[in-house]
Amino acid sequence: MKSGKILPHERIQFATGQGAFHGGTIFFPNEPMRWIYDIGSRSLGGQSKLASAIDRFMRPRMFPAITNNTVDVVFISHFDQDHVNGIPLLKKKGISVKEFVIPALNDQERIISLVDFTIGSRAAENLLPFFLDPQTWLKETFGADTVVRQVEPMNSERTPLFEEPLLENTEDTFSTDRPHLEWPESGINPTMHSGSEGVLSLGPAGGRISFRPFYFKQDLFHPQDFMKACQLHFGTTNCEDILNDLKNGNSFEKVRKDLRGLQKVIAGNVNRSSLCLLINYHVKSRYSYLSCLGGNFSFSKVDHVDWIGTGDVDLKHGLTKTNFYNTIRPTVDRIITFQIPHHGSGKNFDIQDLKVLQNVKNFVVPYGTTNGYGHPSSAIKGIPNLQEVTELSRDFIEAFLLT
């Protein structure tokens, strides 16, 4: 196995407006390893912004000669349009995806995910089959060999804590052969527990990078009320029958009308459940670290470069907040970049928790400047080290060397 002294690495929060598109690349000498966390935008011209961002992601300035057209894994936090409507662009650009990691939804939740879809732009109508049956659509679109992993929600009574191993490196080199992301669950369509660890081994140095998805789900409606609404709007309480009926050609306008009616009985905000992604770097070394937003550069030597994406999770209320911070506690001091949830909504993040995140170097908030939701809130905009990434800004880039 060939080995080298350094391993360049890049993470980018792309400037695509009201939505989210984060991509990471490890530049192994023979072939890059890439991942994506969410890919969507609701902003005017968002599809064009996404298309351009995908091009920058696949052909980075750091290594312009790269021709590989594969993404190893796409993580989806939840099924709002502004987090998923860029997926068809990957296929359109001829990009293959080895695997998707998505929240596991039951039939009721799949119907509820259509609420956001029907309120959104008609330009996304071709995504209706994806919302109806994400697993089937992804495999039909990207190929039967594409693995679709579904992550079960966190158990509210148990938080999967984990220990960070002390690495005893005997060599100071990394493999130049491109490793594969290994998960404990095998199979073509596995269901995973929250906190399952996808491992990317880095060779002789003994290090690894781990990807840990955690699905935090809030129950936002009373099942009895939901069933009554289904009977009223669809004539049945059988969710499977409703989904099959929608697959078989009900007009889009009827779907829009019925689901908007259904929305009225759903208590709370459907945006409060999300699959969060924690990326840990287990390498016994220091990192040469550079971050950049526009013309603002920051260079330093750092001990840790862990990253966490939060989708639209509710980190302000109840068990979700408690479970989230209990989950990340073992590695919270290693997190250097934290994505503020729900585009900086004051309803989803409590600034009092900044004391828990005191070692974070970058708080990143992607949003659209013309959104009608008041994102980000004034409280969020007052956070030190806030990186605001909009359709008018440049990308927020992190580049570092594993050495």
Image (tube, rainbow, N blue to C red):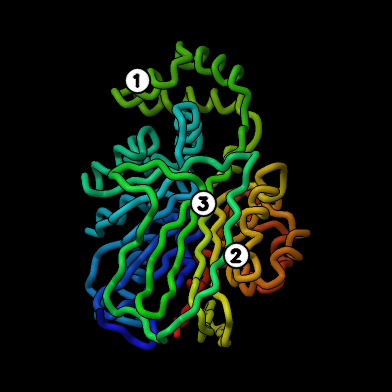
Residue receiving disc 3: 195
**Which-is-in-front pick, marks 2 and 1?**
2
- Residue 368 occupies quadrant: bottom right
Between 11 and 195, the one nearer to me in the picture: 195
Quadrant location, the C terminus: bottom left
Name which of mark 3 and mark 2 comes first in the sequence.
Answer: 3
Inspect the image, locate mark 1, and give the three-letter code of the amino acid beneath it. Asp
Residue receiving disc 2: 338
Label ID, residue 245: 1
The extreme right residue here reads 352
Please give the name of the residue rendered at 59% of the width and 72% of the height, measured from the top-left corner.
336
Please give the name of the residue rendered at 58% of the width and 80% of the height, measured from the top-left corner.
303
Q: CA distance from mark 3 to mark 1?
A: 35 Å
Q: Residues within 10 Å of mark 1 (few under 14, many from 20)?
A: few
Inspect the image, locate mark 2, and give the three-letter code of the amino acid beneath it. Phe
Q: CA distance from mark 2 to mark 1?
A: 41 Å
Q: CA distance from mark 3 to mark 2?
A: 18 Å
Inspect the image, locate mark 3, and give the three-letter code of the amino acid beneath it. Gly
Q: In the rendered image of this protein, does residue 286 appear above or below residue 255? A: below
User: How far from the left and from the top, in percent, is residue 21?
Assistant: 45, 60
Disc 3 element:
loop
Q: Is residue 308 left or right of residue 62?
A: right
Q: In the rendered image of this protein, does residue 287 appear above or below residue 100? A: below
Disc 1 element:
helix
Q: Is residue 297 left or right of residue 254?
A: right
Quadrant location, the N terminus: bottom left
**Which-is-in-front pick, marks 3 and 2?**
3
Residue 366 visible at all: yes
- Residue 58 occupies quadrant: bottom left
Residue 49 visible at all: no
Disc 2 element:
strand
Name which of mark 3 and mark 1 comes first in the sequence.
Answer: 3
